[in-house]
Image (tube, grey):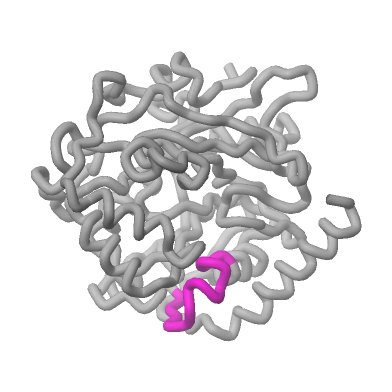
Amino acid sequence: MGSYKLRWRRKRLLARAFLKRRQLRPLSVRLEGLRKGQILLFATLRNERIRLPYFLRYYRDLGVEHFLFVDNGSGDGGGDYLAAQPDVSVWTTDHSYKASRYGMDWIMHLLRRHGHGRWCLTVDVDEFLIYPFCETRPLRALTDWLDASGIRTFSAMMLDMYPRGPVEEQPYREGQNPFEIAQWFDSGNYMISRNWGLGNLWIQGGPRARAFFADNPKAAPALNKIPLVKWHRSYAYVSSTHMMLPRGLNLVFDAWGGEKASGCLLHAKFLDTFALKAQEEMARGQHYAQSREYAAYLEGLRTQPDFWCKWSEKYINWRQLEILGLMSKGNWA
């Protein structure tokens, strides 16, 4: 795709986000004292109240200094819970998730309005960033190193976590660390290709591919993401957080072939809340490709699958993931 077409595509995405700003209603906005160098987190959610206490605690401990949420019509009290948090700003909307590019138009407006010049982390509330040395170094240490190295984006592979045994057998409690239940992941079984048009890697596989898309693995969800960005108002996410424009932001390999520092997003989708969530989202029909992904989930869940297999690995720490080739510290020492 030519540079002119890419620039035009980026302008259209930015224009969409600007127009969709009118769909957001402020519920509780606490941005008056926001400082220039603060690390921000952006997320869209719907009916995820049970996950929020641990999600906020996890990212506060990493060093996120303010959270910006879009609540898309929750009916479980999640918006009110967030509005009561002193380091959270919340906007609400009842407009179509699908028509907003699956929430990205709303998030891009907030990124453009409040994220310019700051390191911004864009994740779902079931995604937990793991990066090199994360047990001993705060997120600020990573962003300082990225700044010093002239790196504007930090990529992460989404790693689906799951329990041993049927998902429904281990109830998740509000505030609980989900990885006390979902302790396992696939150490292999991943397909990687290059999207030459935008320069990003395209990664598929893992338990979702083998459990729900075994007959058509190329239809499995993408696992490549760029969640952490030193945001500029001219940037745009193209497809969720999988790829960006300008396309140079997608390059995760050095020119000489060595891998840049990267992380993983531990994905806590497979808890006992999963079946109910899949039913809700399938009924709403607000997801990509006529909610094909959720249709596959519901079909597969009828047999109450156990994702664990003889190739499953129990999660220990980030060094384990680096040894397995799922993330890298690059030249960050």
Decide whether residue 93 is among the magenta residues.
yes
User: Residue 282 at what x, y percent from top left?
Assistant: 34, 67
Residue at 40% over, 72% down:
285
Left or right of 121 on screen, residue 81: left
Instruction: Specify whether residue 270 is in view.
Output: yes
The answer to whether residue 98 is above or below residue 291 is: below
Q: Residue at point 44% right, 71% down?
A: 286
**Occupied quadrant, residue 153:** top right
Residue 91 point in image, percent of width and height: 46, 76
Is residue 239 shown above or below 20? Answer: above
Can residue 62 be seen?
no
Q: Nearer the viewer, residue 188 or 303?
A: 303
Instruction: Using residue 331 as the reference point, say whether residue 124 is left or right of it.
Output: left
Q: Is residue 175 left or right of residue 46?
A: left
Q: Tell me which segment is drawn in magenta.
A: 91-104
**Residue at the location (35% across, 73% down)?**
83
Residue found farthest to the front:
215
Q: Position of residue 281 (x, y in %)?
A: 34, 67
**333 and 330: which is toward the camera:** 330
The C terminus, quarter of image: top right
Residue beneath the point at 48% across and 31% down: 131
Task: Give the total of numbered labels.
Answer: 0
Residue 145 in the image: x percent, y percent?
63, 30
Q: Is residue 35 magenta?
A: no
Q: Quadrant of residue 124?
A: bottom left
